[in-house]
Amino acid sequence: MARKGRDRADHISVEVTRPDKLFFPDDGISKGDLVEYYRQVAPAIIPYLRDRPLVMDRYPDGITGQRIVQKNVSRHFPDWVSRTEVSKKGGTVCHVVCDKPATLVYLANQASIELHVFLSHLGALDRPDQLVFDLDPPDEEHFGDCCRHALDLRELLEGELGLTSYVKTTGGKGLHVHVPLRPEEDFDSVRGFARDAAALLVSRSPGQLTVEQRKDQRGQRLYLDLMRNAYAQTVIAPYAVRARRGAPAATPLHWAELSDSGLSPRQFTLRTMADRLAQSADPWEGMARHRRGLAGPRRRLAALPEEARQ
């Protein structure tokens, strides 16, 4: 139900304007519903936002209207919204840092449906503390194949290379596999490692996997996208809503869930997430304790026997 008037979070009063305005018209989901969702999931989502620059995908007229990709903090944003300067070619960008529930509520009222975050944190923006493999199947009908290959990727990362990995739905048709890292190397080096790992996985299933960027060259193969592993690139935040019919949410999963043949990326939504969080612990809890460097895994990857690459 849409919340009217003001919303209080962290003892900060946030005015919610036009809460009945429909953002997802086919689903009857309003701005007020979005505000309420982000208010409820704040304890789950803020640990993944609090020390990272944020990029907002705003839809002032709902998901059927124009998308505004906003990096810079607007002048009218209140002083209590945290922010940080990020270097870019020829200058800087002042990004929001979402470190408290009131900021989530405020951004939702600004029609920020999707929240995307950096793969590096404020203490070391030029050195990622995560790498991401984006598993992009040709269509949703191949989601089961996506799950199977994500498990293969986990076996490579954890069983053979000694890393720890985490998986989430993207809110679309695929999965993201995240690897927590110690922020020791720059983005080019980390992306190079991810490229070598992906190439090995492709060599083991060449008819099913590809790193080919051109869609017309992929056929029905699942695309292992590594392009997010670059400076100032972003990834959809865990528990963030996507601007798509049904209001799906990017959802951290337990690895065991990928073996469920009934798993669907559409089952995790703005309307179902509260029940999931109430019934299941966060699958990513404690992720930061499993950060590893890449020196050892890189040596292990290079030393894999030739038959392992076929």
Image: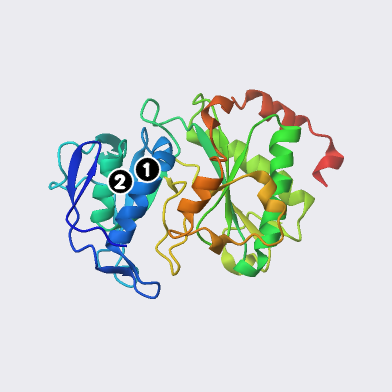
The label shown at residue 292 is none
Residue 230: x %, y % from top left: 46, 41
> Left or right: 273 with respect to 10?
right
Q: Which residue is mark 2?
A: 104
Q: Residue at x 39, y 63 (%)?
A: 243
Category of crowding for the residue at label 1, using alpha-carbon neighbours closer than 10 angstroms: few (below 14), some (14–19), many (at least 20): many
Q: Name the kind of residue labelled 1 in the image.
A: Ala
Q: Name the kind of residue labelled 2 in the image.
A: Leu
The answer to whether residue 303 is above or below residue 54 is above
Q: Residue furthest right?
A: 307
Q: Residue at x 13, y 46 (%)?
A: 75
> Left or right: 125 with respect to 8?
right
> CB atoms at circles 2 and 1 under 8 Å apart?
yes
Residue 66: x %, y % from top left: 29, 68
Q: Secondary structure at mark 2?
A: helix
Point out the frontmost of discs 2 and 1: 1
The label shown at residue 42 is 1
Camera-nearest residue between 227 and 95: 95
Q: Earlier in the sequence, mark 2 or mark 1?
A: 1
The answer to whether residue 270 is above or below residue 132 is below
Category of crowding for the residue at label 2, using alpha-carbon neighbours closer than 10 angstroms: few (below 14), some (14–19), many (at least 20): many
Report which quarter residue 2 is drawn in.
Answer: bottom left
Q: Secondary structure at mark 1?
A: helix
Q: Residue furthest bottom?
A: 26
Residue 18: x %, y % from top left: 19, 64
